[in-house]
Image: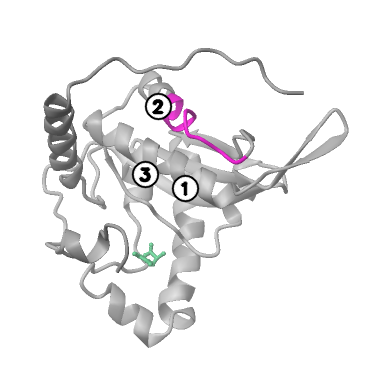
Amino acid sequence: MPARMIPYSLPPLPVDAALAQAAAFADRMRQRRSCRAFSPEVVPREMIVELVRTAHSAPSGANRQPWRFVAVDDPDIKHQIRLAAEAEERESYGRRMPREWLEALEPIGTDAHKPFLDMAPWLIVVFRIDWEEIDGRRFKSYYPSESVGIAVGLFLTACHLAGLATLTHTPSPMNFLRDILGRPANEKPYLLIPVGRPAPDAVAPDLPRKPLETVLQFNRG
Ligand code: IYR
């Protein structure tokens, strides 16, 4: 059945003002960096609610909203996640990742040691839901990876604008997150995002962006 249609409009914004806002926003977002050293400073639970509210505004295939955000601040659960993630990462760095991949990570300087999983005040574990059962009927998600990716993009943006650092962490494989957090089989761990203030001595590698002309084309190439 078609949904009821409601009016949609945006407040008027002169092109010059819109351009200035877009440029200022681009500058602000370019300051975002992946962070691997967090301050233990507390981030209130209400903040996580607002950040996830933004993520939850994302568009999704057939409006299925195929995401679940599990927010963890319990030190014991965080530590359990750290131990499991580091066990997988030791295997990955020591055996599973081919040389080419290890070389690609050299400039970033990562290894199997993940102290930020204890230190960050919050770990946000994002799950992708490929199907859901409602009243005994199975509903398939459409484009779940794209949908959850967009939601995560909005989440990272909301964190940055709230003065919070994030890391898009992918311990691999990460099914241990489903077991530790008690999520059902139709929820697939998608990304683990530590959130908090950067540690006072946090650093980020000085990595260049490709020139914009190399990633943006107008019309035909
Ligand atoms: N998951 C590992 C390895 C890793 C992979 C990529 I691709 C990165 O951009 C960074 C790290 C880890 O988190 O260390």
Q: Amino acid at mark 1?
A: Gly
Kindly identify which residue carries mark 2.
48
Q: CA distance from mark 2 to mark 3?
A: 12 Å
Q: Is residue 58 left or right of residue 186?
A: left
Q: Is residue 110 visible?
A: yes
Q: Nearer the viewer, residue 21 or 196?
A: 21
Q: Nearer the viewer, residue 40 or 124?
A: 124
Q: CA distance from mark 1 to mark 2?
A: 18 Å
Establish if 91 lies above or below 19. below
Residue drawn 29% across the image and 69% down it: 221
Q: Is residue 128 magenta?
A: no
Q: Is residue 6 left or right of residue 132?
A: left
Q: Position of residue 50 (x, y in %)?
A: 39, 22
- Boundaries of the magenta span: 51-61
Which quarter of the figure is the N terminus placed in?
top right
Kindly identify which residue carries mark 1.
149
